[in-house]
Image (cartoon, coloured by chain):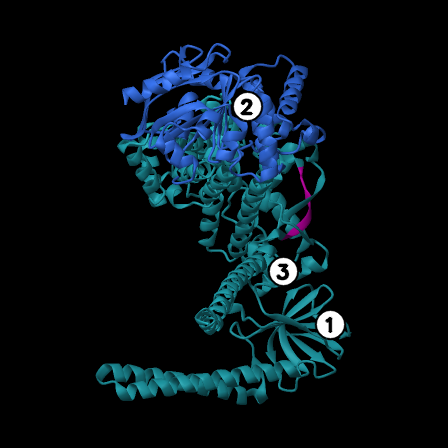
Amino acid sequence: MTDTSDTTSIRDAVSRQLPRRYRAELRFRAAGLAAVASAVGILVILLISILSQGLPAFTVNQLVLPVHLDRSVVDPEGDASEASLRRGAYSRVLQDAIRAEFPEVTARRDLRNLFGLYTPLNATRLMDDVLADPSLVGETYTFRMPIADDLDLYLKGRLVEDRTLATSGLLTISADGDALALNSSAPDFASLVEDAVATMRAEATALDARAERARNLAAELEGSDAEDALYEAERLSAQAQALREELAENDGRIELNRDLPTILVELSGVAVRLTALDANGRSASGEAMLGDAADISGAADWTLYVIDTPESRRRVSDQAIVWTRALEARGLVRTDFNTYLFSNADSREPELAGVKGALFGSILTMLIVICLSVPVGVFTAIYLEEYAPKNRLTDLIEVNINNLAAVPSIVFGLLGLAVFINAFGLPRSAPLVGGLVLSLMTLPTVIIASRAALKAVPQSIRQAALAVGASKTQSVFHHVLPLAAPGILTGSIIGLAQALGETAPLLMIGMVAFIADAPTLGLEGLTQPATVMPVQVFLWSDGAERAFEARTAAAILVLLALMIGFNALAIYLRRRFERRW
Amino acid sequence: MPDNQSHILDQNAGFGETEPPIKVAARDVCVAYDGKQALNHVSIDIPDRSVTAFIGPSGCGKSTFLRCLNRMNDTIEGARVTGSLKIDGAEVNDKSIDPVVLRASVGMVFQKPNPFPKSIYDNVAYGPRIHGLALSRNDLDGIVESSLKKAGLWEEVADRLNDPGTSLSGGQQQRLVIARAIAINPEVILMDEPCSALDPIATAKIEELIDELRENYCIIIVTHSMQQAARVSQRTAFFHMGTLVEFGRTEDIFTNPRDPRTQDYITGRFG
């Protein structure tokens, strides 16, 4: 009787606890799921942001210009020798080619702007083409060169806010003194007038609000500070007033300036920038930007192109945009895969900058790291785990190895500078030294991971090998090491991936630098100046030109691809080993 | 203690001329782990071509003594072995004897089946390979086949020699390990509780196998099962607290033990 009542009470107790236990489990599982979900979410956001920023850098807009390689210009000696070809005036060839597209441009300043459509560094590329194929001399050659970085961004729609408006009226343009008078048979400019008026009103209101704030500030302040604030308020009020008066004057005619959106009237071969809009929405004044616009009557096929970002707030001028659009309309702008990103080393000009130098530098550095840290690390681990006696000395070594893994990586850079460069006299900025430094940094990781993998091999395997008469070394290399190989491999790959993404230790040995030539992929490349992928990312992220922004993300993508390739290789090798054993 | 030892030796001497020759001769073997005595002055003569069982409660030193025979104690740090231990008159602990050579002639089977994570073929072929016993691939095939046949496993695995050894059942794995041990043709086979991880059917097969192998090898088996000792062995040694208490014919030990401790152990009063 007592037995049954005991059982019931135990059952009661257990079932009382049960809901709480299940709730605890549920909570734990929910927390785990939430952690995984947020990790995945953040990863996805990261990838999307990098991809959206970096993908545009994988295409490039190129000018495809027929260049005439006049013998007297590119071959000054006239003997077609390499020395002579190297002295050719290739920048003049390019300048002539672009001038041929816009013969009306003659003023010195305008010409300078025109030559700014591409970087002069392209002259060197043209020279390389000619040197590679001297038969081009005297011929007309279709040369592709990347358009200037800002215009590239403009063409990709990442630089300005713009829109194209359709028109319904017939356009007549006539000369009006220095300027041009534009008239449309329909109120095609009306919406632009409204926009401009609204913009100016909003501006005036904003100025008033700022003036009000300044006045309030003046009331709180005393002495000269109050006077200054009051003066500022008066100035702002006056500006607002001026804007309003401007709107009221001239029968509502609005003068356009660099602080207002640019409005371009475009018809075939002609572009006119509007300088003033009449309140009637049918007439306007303008200035010619492209082609001969002085005598046009009754043109039906014309559009209004509005760049909402004012000229004063962007890096490309209206004129450059007009030229670029003209070149595009003539089919001289081609969007290509950005081969420069992979065939070039770093450059000051973003459109010609590439990751080749950094990629090769990384590959060379990694080769050194693989060749040094993996064998040394694995054999150290084998010795410590399988052979070394357990005593104070080995304990000390073990503690020190574990501590080394926690040493900040820049310290290894200092060591590299002091030992490899100063004491051994190895060259600066070289993948050899970088590889040595990163090997030292990676060694503890490899040793610790390898020891853990060796430790995980069951003792019975060692005994089995010894019992059939295998020597210690045979038991280790025939049985223990193959079983530990997947773990060793994983640890080594983690170490290598860490080394691949490291920048700090390279700072000290001169690998964080602008290096415009890629090292050769070979033994001699080990001592040539080079940089590595993460350093390239770091340098570009610091670049002044906006086009470096996309290239930074693109370089990160290349680095990520490299890492994924690395890990895929590791997984493949792991699988292979696991299948065999 | 000396009295006790001579008594056991006397008992051995009484086996008579019909008995097989002595294979293993131990005198005053002591083992200490980190200074802690695990085995005290064990002296024993183990005959060839028979099965000798070591019985005794856990921690009595029987496995320790077994490991002395192929110097597996060398692999344990802090282990110290003293005394004289001769196999075929050659001193095992002599500096001139390489443990690798010794282990090639003294095979061992462990408590838990421990095949290498390789194919069945490679498991058996490993020993002959490292010792260079096979001159050709055909030789090696022959050794593998005959070893597996001797271990009674050939029928079951002949058509899947390339499967991993770990894919076999526990009993099969243990027979594979025995095949691996006999592939290098040892003179002595040590078995450390070979059936403790197996079910009764697999145990029966192993016992049958041991009985067959007895014709060619000197087999020493450590076991916790007194029935097993009675079934498979011709001689039984009873260890207790690191000393050899009694050694003699199995039927004598089980029917007519001389020492009260043996009596207590086999009747299940302790242990």
Please state which amino acid type lies under the numbered disc 2: Ala
Give the total of numbered labels. 3
Q: Chain of mark 2?
A: B
Residue B106: x, y in percent?
A: 48, 19
Quadrant (top left/top right/bottom left/bottom right) for the C terminus of chain B = top left
Residue shown at the point (70%, 84%) measured from the top left: A187
Task: Say which residue label 2 marks.
Answer: B181
Mark 2 vs mark 3, foreground winner is 2
- Residue A239 position (above or below residue B251): below
Q: Is residue B86 above or below residue A269?
A: above
Asked which secondary structure carries label 3, the reply is: helix
Task: Out of A105 and A498, give the one closest to the viewer.
Answer: A498
Does the CB distance between marks 2 and 3 fall below 8 Å? no
Q: Quadrant of the N terminus of chain B?
A: top left
Furthest residue toward front: B256
Q: Secondary structure at mark 1?
A: loop
Residue marked by disc 1 = A302
Q: Mark 1 is on which residue type?
A: Trp
Residue A576 in view (yes/no): no
User: Which stretch is magenta?
Assistant: A60-70
Disc 1 and disc 3 on one polypeptide chain: yes
Q: Position of residue A295 (x, y in %)?
A: 72, 71
Q: Quadrant of residue B41?
A: top left
Picture quadrant where residue B201 is located: top right
Rendered colour, chain A: cyan
Which residue in the protein does label 3 denote? A155
